[in-house]
Structures are given as structure tokens and as C-alpha cells.
Amino acid sequence: MKNLFYKTGTLALFAGVLLTSCDPDIDTPSSSAGTADFTSYVAVGNSLSAGYADNGLTLPGQQASLPAILASQFQKAGGGAFEQPLFPEDKPNGSGYLRLTGFTPQGQPITQPVTTDLAVRGQNEKGAPLYTKYTENVNNLAIPGIKTADIKTPGYGSTQGNAYFERLTDNPMQTYLQYVQAQAEAANHTFFSVWIAENDVLGYATSGGAFETDPRYKITPVADFDANFKELLDVLTADKQKGVLITVPDVTSVPFFTTLGPSIKQVLATNNIPGMVAITGSGRDRTQFAASQIGAAENGIYFPLTASSYAPLIGQPTGKYWRELAKQLSPSQDPLVVRLTLAGVLANYGIDTTAMFGLSAGNPLPSALVLDPVEQAKIKTATEGYNQIIKAQATARDLAFFDANAYFKSIQGGFAANNVGYSPAFITGNLFSLDGIHPTPRGYAVVANEVIDVINSKYNANIPKADITQYDAVLFPGRQ
Amino acid sequence: MKSRILALLGGTLLSASAMAGGYQVNLASQRQIGMGHTGTGLVTGTSSIFFNPGAMSYVRENGVTIGASALFSKIAYSAPESNGVTARTDNPVGTPFQVYAVYKINDKLAAGLGVYTPFGSTAKWGQEWSGRFGLEELSLSAIFFQPTLSYAITDKLGIGAGLTYVKGSVNLQRGIPVQDEAGNYGRAELDGDGTSLGYNVGIYFKPSEKLSLGINYRSRVDVDVEEGDATFTVAPSLKSRFPDTKFGASLPLPATLSVGIGFMPTEALTIAVDVNRVEWSAYESLRFDYKDAVNGSNFTENARNYEDAYIYRIGAEYKATEALALRAGAYYDSSPVQDGYLTPETPDADARGLSVGLGYSVSDNIKLDASFLYINKKERTDASDKSGGIGGTYKAVAYIPGLALTYNF
């Protein structure tokens, strides 16, 4: 009896084990490249295509770069290998980056630069770091910091000092455009992406429009952008290759500009202060704004994250910002020379450091710490100008077109995916890294999926979407 | 032997995967599983304790039945626009079981005790899949203890009622989308149990030799977890936002109203048809209340808004010989989950069930029943945008062999 029970039971279990191998299946569409060909994909662009995040370029960042994510999805639709100028595995921290180390009692994030395991091989004559060389052929041609205006500048990597370009080329006088041409030919590329115009306005924006006369911080004139952009596309579409063009997002909507405003507004409200005084542009002109303008949709005022350490000084007599600026500008760090520089700076901008900081014409907010409506208007005009050209070129050359500007506008209110909330909020929004400008790897994956959408629809392709949950967002201190 | 099997069950029991609508598990009798889980309008033997206490007084002898099923369930998931199956559950084998004992006090009155597991759910998706912030693993179980009395008013009409004492438990694990400095994601685990009371009543009517009817109502039972343990594993810098704390939750186990008919065209053949109405509308939301605020909130709540669902069943038994009975059945189980509310806990869809079974009398007082049930849920694609679920396409199947032993005396 007992025997029979066990025998039957064993038989039933055995049958069950057999049957469990009959897994359910789901019929899904198969991946295809449509009319595109991803055999050899090259990516052209700036930090947003290089994998830059947390104010630095690192090996993990490169591995999760937007083009790398795209390429790994392309590979499911016939795409080929995608080489990147990766930092060595024993120097994964590359340029160094910002890491989150904790929070202040008020809940403000505390960040700290990581300076270990850097891929630094030396210094240039100005004392800036030089990174580990990578002169093999690559598919990811993106250079952090590059402007469209820079692509024909000889010595851009060497004499002009872009260390990210310097590491990729053996020819110090090679322009970026020449480099792209050489690499594209070597790759015999069949598909490309271009996302490049960001830095043509970003430097101006992040410096609060304060150093317009310095070419590094000036807005690239739309006509200059137009000429260079077309030349770049001529190179990339020489054999009628297919590709995708991406617009510049509105740089003022990133956490770098939206995070600080609410807390300053709060301080003003608590102290019944109706408004503030700031310097506008690169001169010494003062401008006044009302507290209600902070973060407003019309005539808004934005504070860059770089103003964080000065915000607590509002209303106090202080010359902190100017002392630090003088130190930077001073030809020598000799205290006497620095003091002389400071005197010059104060005279130049008409500053009285005994007046109330940010609240008086005598001691206004420095231009670099505020983005006022006049400055924003210049950014907007340029951004719209570039984006119109990008769109027109996509149409003229019959390329896929991703309007990143429209996309980032559409997600200002946030969205949810996989039961995870996303928004442009600093740190908590999961999309933006600790520099407040560049996406997290997860943010790049979100963008990659949007780019895949436009490629699929333009080329009648069916590239599968990336699993965004496999990519990191902001990492919090401590090991669980 | 009985105690040994019970001990064995005790070790592995209560991981029944929900393979009926919602988290109901309709595996209450091996004989009846073979007949498409009909039985409301029949005298099913000791299992009338479950199917219809009104019929229990008509069993001819005292009897004890113990049985269990081995539930192999598999769910495949395809993330939106992923062009493939991106996740599969790794569910442990579920072991829903049943123990029934019926004692005839006299010709008209019978007393019984049933222990069975009509609700449960196990879904183990793991820590890698894209929906892990919705669910990594859920294990939900309820064990019902039901003392029952049944009285035959006449030869044709019987009534019965049982009180159900329910012991339920829940264990839910999910990822928290915050990462520590090494990139590890946070995790939450909610673990708790609760008890509750309900009832099971039925009327059985046999107007002729060839026809019998039954109606049965199993009440709603709310399993209230009061002092469950909520444990959060996160980066130390976030621990103050995710303190380990206690939680409360209430999980409704819905009422089921069943009507059934039995036809006995010949001595050897029994045909049964049942309709179950499961009052799933009781399940409006899944809410956890925390004693201490978790990530700034004292509760989490996700809408469920289930709809009442109907199950249509048909089954037959043919006595091939005195000792051997052959059975077959089928059912159609409509899902209580509305569009927009699909979750990975119970990625439910309309389901088709096909069953076969056999009964064999080893001796005058020992009988074996074996059953095999195959459940195929329809492939279902849902945005899951109203439930905090994970959108995508789900497809589930289950293979459920089962075995029971009955001793009559």
C-alpha cells in the first residue's frame, strides 16, 4: 500500500518535472534593421555621447555611454562591434568624477571629487592633466567639451588644450573634423549619430553669461554653427549613409539651474525680501529682479549649482566670490599680487564688499551666479537657431531626427517606468547625475530608447528597447 | 502514516501558486480536480465539506481523505518593445493540500473537519528582471480549518454549515530603486500573518435518481496582518529614510457563490456542471500601513479594483469497473483583473483548464484518487498603469498532478 503510494507519487513528480520544461512562450516581433544598416556605427558628439556623468569621464561611464547603449541594441538587429576609447581597467576613474558623500542636516547633498585611479599620464604646459592615450580606431568619436565651433580648429587637442581629444590623436594639429573623416573612413561606417550642439551654449549658460568675451564661454553664432555642422554632415553622409541627428535640449531646464532657486526663494520669503540685485552679462551693469521671478516660466531667474556655496551669504557683507575670482585670474599666487588683482576686480565691477551681498547695488550677485532673463533669451535664440538647422538638415539629408529639446520639455513633470519614478529633479529624479547637467547612465538609457523610437520609425526598423533598469542612477554613500 | 504526511506537508506547504483567477487556488479534491473541479451539485465524498456541506450528510460511510497536488507553474514575461521573452518566474513547486474527515453521527447528521488551502500565490521573479521594483517575490498563503455539520432534512434535501478559521500569511519582496555606492539596489521585505473567521454553507437537493442540485456559499474572509515585519536593506546613508518597522495590511479572500448540477444518466456515469461566482470586487487596493514613515510616507497603496469573476466548469466520471473510475473535465475561468491593473504578483488572464483523473479502490475501504490538471492562461498584454504594476506581456501555464488517499470505515 505504502509502496504504491510512493510509486505513484514518484511517477507524478517525475511527470511534473518533465512538464516544467514546457515553458510558456510569447510570440514577439523579431528585431530588424529595416532599411538601415548598423554594421558599422560611428557616434559623433560631445560629453553627452562620450558617457560623461558626475562631472567626469570614467570607464563605467564610457561603458554606459548613449552610443554604447544604442550599439548594443543595434547588435540585436545586425549591428557590428562598437569600439570606444575606453580608459584602462586599472585606471577606471579616468578624469576623476564627483561622488556623493552624504547630506547636510538640511538634506543638501555633499559631493567630493574622486582623485584616485585616474587615467592621467602627465600635464600639459598649462598644468592641465593629460589622459592615457587611445589612438586605435574607434566608433565612438565623442569629445567631452567640444563645440561645433571647434571642429575645424587646428591644435584643438594640443594648443587649445582639450585633453579628451588630445588622447585620441597622434597628430597634434589634426582638427576634429579631420579626425572624424579619418575614423569614418577607417570604420567604413554605415550608420551614424550626431549630438553635438550642447556646448555651443552651455559654457555661456553655466558661467551665467559672465565671461562672454572669452571664446570658451561665448555662444557660438548660429551662422558659424550652420557652416560647421553642414561640413560635418557632408563627411558623415559622403556615401549617403543613414543616421540620426539630435537637437540641443534647453540647457536651463536641467537640475544645474533648477535645484538652487527654490531654497533661495524660501530664504527671501522668510526674511520678507522682495527681490535681489545682480550683475548681468559680462560687464558691470546691474539688474534687479523680484523674488517671484525665481524659477518662473516667464522672465525667470535661475541660479547655477555653482552658486550653492554663496547662497548662504545673501544679505551679508562679503567678498568671498571676488576673492576667489581674483585668485583664479591672478597671474601669480603671491598674496600681494592676488590682493592687487582683487583690488582691480573690485574696481572694475564697482564692488563694495561691506554692502549686503545680493541685495544691494554695491555688492550685487556676480553675473556668474545667476542666469537672468536677458542671458536666457540669448541662449534660447541660439538653441532654437541650432535646432532649426539640425531639423532642416535631417530633412534635407533624409535622416532620422530626435528632438531631445522637445523630449526633455515633455518630461518636466516626471514619468514612471518599471515602478520607478523619473523626473528632472536633482538626485531624486534618477535621470541626471551629480553635475546636474549630464544624465546618469540610466538617463542615457532612457534617451537611447527614445532615439531607437525615431530610428525605428524612420527606417522601418525594429530595434528592441534597452532594459533601463540595468543602468545605474545616482549612487548613495555606504555599502548596504 | 497520516501524521507523517502531514508533517511532510507542514515542511513545504502553503506555497500554492495562484492558478485560478486572482490568487484563488481551486484544488480542493483530487477526485473533483479530475472532473474539472465541479462538485457543488454532487455528493463528492469527504470533500463535500468544501464543495457543499449540504451534501455531506449523504456520504455513506465515515471517511478520512488526505491529498495534495504538486503545482508547477511557469510565467513568461516580455517587456514592451523588447522583441523577446525578457523574464521567467522561477516558482517553487506549490503544494496545495486537503485533509477531510467525516463522521456520521446518525443517518441524518454528519460532522466533519476540513483543512484545505483555497487561496495562495507564489511568484518568484528574481532580482534581475526589469520589474523587480514592482515585485521580486511574493508568497501568499491561507490555510482554512473548517469544522462542519450537515443535516439531511429529507432523503432529497440536505443542509450544512461550517465555520472557517483561517490562518493567512504574506511575504513580499521587492527592489527599492536606490543604489548604494557599489551599485546594489535596495530591497524591501514585508512579512506577516494574521487569522480570521468565515463560514461555508450549502444546500443539496436531489429531486430524482438521475439529477442532483447544489448551492454553496463560502464567505469572504479578510486576513488582517497587524504586526508584520517590514525590513529594508538600503545604503547606510538612506537608512534613516527606510527604518525597519512594523506594518499592517488587510487582504480580502473573496466570497465564492457556486451552483452545481449533477446528472446520472446511468449507474456508471456522472456528469457535473458548476458555475462559480467569485466576488473579487472585494479586492480594491493593496495597502500597507507602516508604523514609522518609510521614505516619507506612512503607507503605500496600489489600486487593484478587481471585478467579480465567473468560472464555468464541466466534468464527468465513468466507472469502468467496480474498482476503477475514469474522469475528465474542463473549465473556463474569467479573470477578475481589469485592463490597466495587471501586476506581476498575479499576472492574471482568462484561463482554460483541462483535467483528467482516475480513482481506484485498492480494497473495500481504501481508495486512491489521482488527478492531472493543465491550466493555460491567455497571453495578456497590459500597460499596468493603474496598479503600480509592470507593463508588458505575460503568459502563464501550470501542470498540476495530484494524489489523494481515502480511508472509509
Image: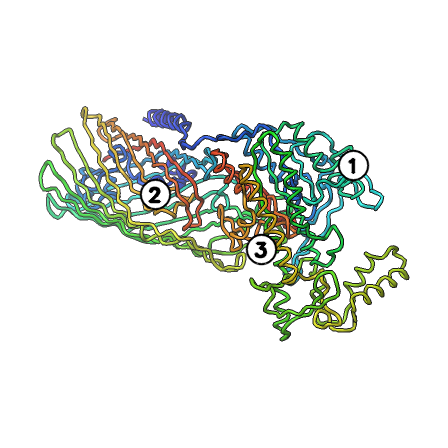
> Which residue type carries mark 3?
Ala
| Quarter occupied by residue B212 | top left
What whole-number distance in Å separates the C-alpha atoms at marks 3 and 2? 47 Å
Question: What residue is pinned by disc 3?
Answer: A425
* A325 or B389: nearer the viewer: A325
Instruction: Identify the element where label 3 is drawn.
Output: loop
Q: Nearer the viewer, residue B81 or B160?
A: B81
Above or below residue B359? Residue B246 is: below
Q: Residues within 10 Å of mark 1 (few under 14, many from 20)?
A: some
Question: In front here: A246 or A108?
Answer: A246
Question: Could you say which is closer to the camera, residue A415 or residue A103?
Answer: A415
Q: Quadrant of the N terminus of chain B?
A: top left
Residue occupying the far left of the picture? B208
Q: Which residue is mark 1?
A: A173
Marks 3, 1 in one chain: yes
Q: Amino acid at mark 2?
A: Thr
- Residue under numbered circle 2: B117
- Distance, label 1 to label 2, CA atoms, is 78 Å
Question: Quick check: A453 left or right of B108?
Answer: right
Circle 2 SS class: strand
- Residue B4, given in percent of the width and then of the height, sits at 38, 35
Q: Are marks 3 and 1 in contact (CB under 8 Å)?
A: no
* Chain containing the residue with disc 2: B
Residue B154 in percent (x, y) is at: 10, 46
Mark pair 3, 1: CA separation: 41 Å
